[in-house]
Image (cartoon, rainbow, N blue to C red):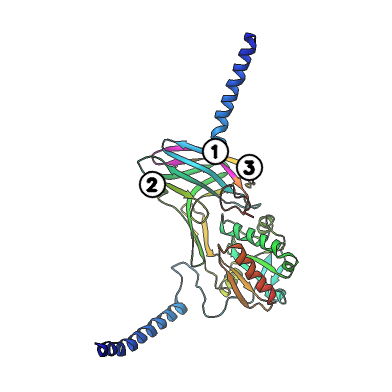
């Protein structure tokens, strides 16, 4: 084997390793800062003309200190707010979560249909299933974590459940 | 001992009955006279949900309760600035219409906005493109919407947010009405698909 062939192999191996490193977090779809891990951020596809959308994720805290999600952004939305929705006695209510979303030490918090979610306001374009968009989640202690939201179908009730039927 | 218990029972039973009667009366009173918190709409109680209406559909055409005579219908109140309950309900209804097969053609499905300021016919037309074409979107003047919401005993309330924007609280159930426009059943939000389909099949079978 010539020296140049070895060099080529090494370059190829290096490129492959880099590609793996880059693909790793994207494939697992997790984003981390310190003890805080954001697992599978997703959003529901929106009908044409919709001005709002819902963003969801699971947040895990592997550390000994509680933390708190305090704000979020999404490139597709003019603004993103943390809201809490509830259906009680048949009435749907939705309110900004003034105190953010607490993430207990060693525990997790869910942004999920039926509870806390990111309210994506002033949508710049419809969210289409299969697409993704960039955003950030900012925590009191862990700081700002850049994430990628994947857009699931309108009928989705959770990540990767697709249309559910 | 036995006599003591009997004595106590003789006193307690009528007392318990009296208390129950008072509680029932109070509950009935509250049911009839309870109103929404300040700024809210009054929920009408007493009569069954439903009644006459005259609204505008997503094509700009007028649709009234008289146009629905002879066909059962399902009606849901919501708004397009709604990230979860409304798209989910419309999507579930679209799935149900498919699952019902040809029977579904006998069913009308109405989506009435409680946010007529923002939801104009063209807004509804765009929005409904994502769902089954048999779903009719309806809007109207604020008075027309208030009237139909009241007749369906729908709770809805505009909630201002800090940024000067607003969101809506609203009843999240689907009302099932027969071919004469009479109330038949409710499908609550979150009802599993088999139960939703069963309720719709019962509605169609009774028509």
Residue denoted by label 3: A131
Q: Which mark is in front, 3 or 2?
A: 2
- Image mark 3: chain: A
Distance from disc 3 to disc 1, alpha carbons, whole Å, reads: 16 Å
- Image mark 1: chain: A
- Quarter holding the N terminus of chain A is top right
Residue denoted by label 1: A28
Q: Which mark is in front, 3 or 1?
A: 1
Which is nearer the N-term, disc 3 or disc 1? 1
Task: From the viewer's perspective, tell me whether residue A64 is left or right of residue A59.
Answer: left
- Image mark 2: chain: A
Q: Secondary structure at mark 1?
A: helix
Q: Main secondary structure of the magenta part?
A: strand
Residue at 37% across, 84% down: B22
Label 2 and label 1 in one chain: yes
Q: Nearer the viewer, residue B70 or B33?
A: B70
Q: Nearer the viewer, residue B80 or A161?
A: A161
Image: magenta residue range? A137-150
Q: Nearer the viewer, residue B105 or A75?
A: B105
Q: Position of residue B126 (x, y in %)?
A: 68, 55
Instruction: Confirm whether the magenta stretch covers residue A140.
Output: yes
Q: Which numbered circle lies on residue A104?
A: 2
Q: Position of residue B115 (x, y in %)?
A: 58, 62
Task: From the viewer's perspective, tell me whether residue A93 is left or right of residue B92.
Answer: left
Label 2: few (<14), some (14–19) or many (≥20) C-alpha neighbours in 10 Å: some
The reply to whether residue B157 is in sight is no
The reply to whether residue B12 is in sight is yes
Q: Residue furthest front?
A: B2
């Amino acid at each position: 084997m010539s020296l140049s062939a070895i060099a080529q192999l090494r370059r190829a191996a290096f490129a492959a390793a880099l590609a793996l490193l880059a693909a790793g977090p994207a494939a697992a779809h997790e984003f981390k800062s310190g003890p805080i891990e954001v697992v599978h951020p997703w959003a529901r596809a929106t009908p044409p003309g919709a001005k709002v959308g819902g963003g969801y994720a699971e947040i895990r805290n592997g550390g000994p200190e509680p933390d708190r999600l305090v704000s979020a952004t999404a490139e597709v939305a003019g603004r993103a707010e943390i809201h809490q929705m509830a259906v009680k006695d048949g009435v749907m209510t939705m309110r900004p979560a003034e105190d953010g979303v607490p993430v207990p030490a060693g525990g997790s918090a869910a942004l999920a249909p039926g509870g806390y979610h990111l309210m994506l306001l002033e949508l710049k374009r419809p969210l289409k299933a299969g697409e993704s968009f960039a955003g950030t989640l900012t925590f009191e202690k862990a700081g700002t974590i850049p994430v990628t939201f994947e857009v699931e179908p309108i009928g989705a009730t959770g990540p990767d459940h697709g249309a559910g039927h | 001992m036995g006599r003591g218990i009997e004595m106590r029972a003789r006193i307690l039973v009528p007392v318990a009955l009296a208390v129950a009667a008072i509680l029932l009366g109070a509950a009935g009173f509250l049911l009839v006279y309870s109103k929404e918190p300040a700024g809210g709409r009054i929920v009408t109680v007493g009569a069954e949900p439903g009644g006459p209406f005259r609204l505008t559909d997503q094509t700009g055409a007028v649709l009234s309760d008289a146009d629905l005579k002879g066909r059962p219908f399902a009606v849901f109140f919501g708004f397009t600035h709604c990230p979860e309950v409304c798209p989910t309900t419309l999507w579930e209804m679209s799935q149900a219409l498919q699952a019902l097969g040809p029977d579904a053609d006998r069913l009308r499905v109405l989506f009435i906005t409680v946010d007529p300021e923002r939801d104009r016919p063209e807004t509804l037309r765009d929005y409904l493109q994502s769902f089954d074409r048999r779903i009719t979107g309806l809007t109207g003047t604020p008075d027309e919407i208030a009237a139909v919401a009241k007749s369906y005993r729908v709770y809805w309330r505009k909630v201002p947010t800090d940024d000067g924007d607003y969101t809506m609280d609203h009843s999240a159930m689907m009302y099932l009405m027969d071919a004469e426009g009479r109330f038949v059943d409710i499908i609550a939000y979150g009802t599993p698909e088999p139960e939703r389909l069963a309720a719709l099949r019962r509605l169609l079978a009774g028509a």
